[in-house]
Image (tube, rainbow, N blue to C red):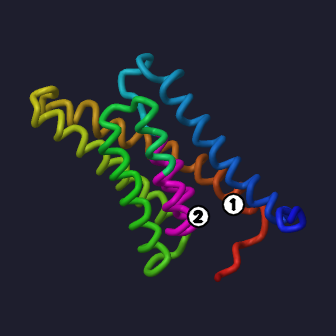
Amino acid sequence: MLDKLYITPRQWLHFLRWALYSLLLLLVIMLQTVVLAGRVSVCPDFVPMVIVCVCLREGPERGGTFALIASLLWCLSGADQGSVAIAVLTIVPVAGALISRAVLTNRFIPCLIIAFATVLIEQSIMFFLKFFFNNASGVLFFTKLLPCVLISTLAQPPIYLLVKRIAKIGARYEST
């Protein structure tokens, strides 16, 4: 029975890859919530950048699973409007990965566009929910939301490069 529990070196490399993805997500969550929260006037949103980059690099199946687990972790960490984040941070990156695989090339520019769209959609939905319940004024859309989306998008290139390097660990998955 113990011979069936043997983990090959290739499987260890896959574990390492996903552990590094998880560590990157944890570091980004720590940076966003501990270091930047409350210290800057426009707080960027880096978590969607990691989720989108991993989802596009790993594909809609494995990347979608990562997106669901990461967005659930983000919601459980006490994020503002976390339930909205679960839906948006799972659906938009998976749809972007499907579109990227079918129509676009899996390169930097499509990833940047999909990451921008993800942050814009997530932040807009959260803003309009707050606006609907009279917790935000309309002018905050231009003074807080749009700068947040632009600053978050500027953080995508280094995250993309890290994810691209991590994705090279281990061999490609075989199709079943």
Residue 107 at what x, y percent from top left? 56, 68
Labelled pair 2, 1 in contact (Cβ < 8 Å): yes
Instruction: State which quarter of the image contains the C terminus.
Output: bottom right
Residue 3 at what x, y percent from top left? 90, 66
Element on which disc 2 rests: helix
Specify the quadrant of the image occupied by residue 30: top right
Q: Residue at x 54, y 71 (%)?
A: 106
Specify the quadrant of the image occupied by residue 171: bottom right
Q: What residue is disc 1 on?
A: 167
Taking depth in this image into account, of 18 and 146 the one nearest to the observer is: 18
Q: Is residue 131 left or right of residue 35?
A: left
Q: Amino acid at mark 1?
A: Ala
Q: Residue at x 74, y 60 (%)?
A: 14
- Residue 64: which disc? none
Q: What residue is disc 2 on?
A: 57
Q: Residue at x 57, y 57 (%)?
A: 54
Spatial separation of the CA atoms under disc 2 and disc 1: 7 Å
Res 9 seen here: no
Taking depth in this image into account, of 167 and 117 the one nearest to the observer is: 167
Q: Which residues are magenta?
A: 46-68
